[in-house]
Amino acid sequence: MSSSKINIMSEEDSPIWRIKYRPKKLSEIKNLFPKLYEQLKGFIQSNNFPHLMLIGPPGSGKTMIGELIAREILGKEFTMNSKILYADDPIGKAERNESKRQGRVSSKMLGSGAGSQKNFRPFIQIRVRPFVSTKKFGKSPFKILIIKNFHDLDVEQQGFRRIMERYSRNCRMILITDRISSIIDPIVSRCQLLLVPYLPDFKFNKLIKTICDQEKIPIKLDVIEYIRHMSEKNIGKALDLLQITKIKYNELSLDSLSKVYSMITDRGILNLISLTMQGDVKSLRTKVRSIFQNQNLSKDEILFEMSKRIADMPLEPHVQALYLELIANTDFGALDSQSDEIQLLNLLIQMNMIGKMNFN
């Protein structure tokens, strides 16, 4: 009986540039983040670290650095002893039902709590607790849980604080956030804070040039400067824009990059405006989340593109003015907002209400 060999594609062989050029070892970020690297090197040498909170703007590399720490500490047991959760992932109906079921105390039990219902938080009870409470695998010093967008936990943060205290010996937490002001003090005080800034302009430019050289693609400085501006120094977003442009036009120029950028942003924004006119709130929420997470657009980019699209639409002047005023107010009010997603969704619902009053 002949055996067949299965070839597993490594990250180095990935056709997607943001994966292919993602650092695989902590030493690879030494020149990018020298001060941060020196802090992290001490953790690796001691094979130990406290709960960490990585703070920085979107796309600065916080999650990548969290993963590198976990890989260095856990080694071959990384897959078994680490987990990444997204605090902003919606809780499903099945998870809510399971959380309620686990909180139900049988009436056959003895004591005053018999027949009562405990109010377990689904994210903690269903997603976090099963991982942090089970024993580590192999010879790893502990398990590592990485939670992205931790600020979105909101009311569950108090419950998470107790989880951090109870299971700290068995599991270390790496919390990722770009809004530390939305995290309660008891959690902040239990973490060592690490700042992950955007790369300085010259380092961003050098990194993009190096990647283009490896791909054997000519690129000029003005093009790199344009990419840095349009991606807002987000390396992953910049590589996506570069790769899509190379595939579509087989060159990297200001003109080709502008066309691809407009194509990517316009398609998502036009769909968003269309859903707004239809008034499907559930689809709106899904689309807003998709634009933030998958298309890597910021709140400012979305509002800017929406204003351009609405200004070009064949609407009654007073309706057009109302829409643009709402966008301007949202842009101003979002300065103090803790959630860009909620602000944007609120804007779209208000736009839908104006549409109903004027078109129905």
Image: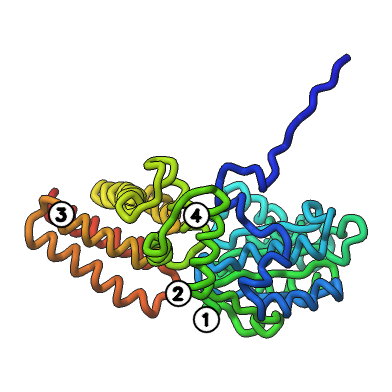
Q: Is label 2 in contact with label 3 (beta carbons under 8 Å)?
A: no
Q: Mark 1 is on which residue type? A: Ser
**Residue 312 at x, y = what percent?**
15, 54
Q: Quadrant of residue 196?
A: bottom right
Q: Mark 3 is on which residue type? A: Asp
Q: Name the quarter where the N terminus is drawn.
A: top right
Residue at 84% across / 62% down in the picture?
110
Q: Mark 4 is on which residue type? A: Leu
| Residue at numbered disc 4 | 239
Q: Nearer the viewer, mark 3 or mark 4?
A: 4
Considering the numbered disc 3 on the image, is that residue within a helix, a strand or a loop? Answer: helix
| Residue at numbered disc 2 | 338
Residue at 57% across / 54% down in the picture?
91
| Residue at numbered disc 3 | 312
Q: Earlier in the sequence, mark 1 or mark 4?
A: 1
Residue at 43% across / 65% down in the picture?
228
